[in-house]
Image (tube, rainbow, N blue to C red):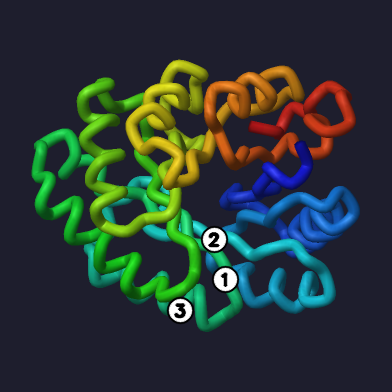
Amino acid sequence: MNHYIDHTLLSANATTNQINTLCDEAHQHQFFSVCINPGFVEHCAQRLKASNVKICTVIGFPLGANTTAVKVFETKNAISSGADEIDMVVNISDVLDANWNKVEQEIRAIKEACGPQLLKVIFETCLLTNEQIVELCNISQRAGADFVKTSTGFSTGGATVEHIKLMRDTVGKTMGVKASGGVRTRETAQAMIDAGASRIGASASVSIVSGQAPAAHDY
């Protein structure tokens, strides 16, 4: 299970010492990546340069309400700083307004900015209907994204088995599906994997793989 996990710390009050611990835990447990805010990308890339742990960062986080131009700049800056993977938040207002052309154009622009680096599209599924989730999966696929992802972990809800199944059924086997938000135990993580998740985003990663109770701050 370890290699499914993006070991995550996105809190506004994260300290460098906490980020160092995150990196060391990811290296020790061989998690797939660390997922951190853009300001820590260069630091984590240096700390983990001798490891196989990837550097994942978030763009337009957590609201998705930045302009496309800002998100594109963020993406290019993050990659130049050492990011291997980009998790972008869609403009949720555009999704709710069914402004699908604009949504697709933005995902396409950010994927172009990524170049060969992997792009995950964060939906915030707790705010969407199943029909909107399906449409967004199709758009993400057409726009060239590599993954679809449930949640930021900062809204009204996180990943559910039902949404993971829906997303996997929609994108088929050609895209990744990331379950993020509220995955705090090994049992929940396994249920997401069984439902079709190919990546797990979690701050409770060490608890998940060790079977220990998650800490109060883990989300």
Q: Tell me if residue 163 comes above or below residue 149 in the rendering.
A: above
Q: Report x, y in % for residue 24.
A: 86, 58
Q: Are marks 2 and 1 in contact (CB under 8 Å)?
A: yes
The label on residue 77 is: 3
Furthest toward the bottom, the residue is 80
Q: Nearer the viewer, residue 94 or 190?
A: 190
Q: Report x, y in % for residue 144.
A: 32, 59
Q: Residues within 10 Å of mark 1 (few under 14, many from 20)?
A: many
Q: Report x, y in % for residue 183.
A: 63, 28
- On screen, residue 207 versus residue 198, left or right, reads right
Quick one: SS at disc 3?
helix
Q: Residue at point 63% right, 32% down?
A: 219
Q: Report x, y in % for residue 110.
A: 32, 66
N-term mark: 3 or 1? 3
- On screen, residue 145 versus residue 10, left or right, reads left
Q: Kindly identify the amino acid type of the residue bearing the numbered disc 2.
A: Thr
N-term mark: 2 or 3? 2
Quick one: SS at disc 1?
loop
Dot 2 corresponds to which residue? 57
Residue 70 found in image quarter: bottom left
Q: Nearer the viewer, residue 126 or 175?
A: 175
Dividing the image into 4 quarters, which one contains the N terminus? top right
Q: Are marks 2 and 3 in contact (CB under 8 Å)?
A: no
Q: CA distance from mark 3 to mark 1?
A: 9 Å
- On screen, residue 212 versus residue 152, left or right, reads right
Q: Kindly identify the amino acid type of the residue bearing the numbered disc 3.
A: Asn
Dot 1 corresponds to which residue? 83
Q: Tell me if residue 96 comes above or below residue 130 in the rendering.
A: below
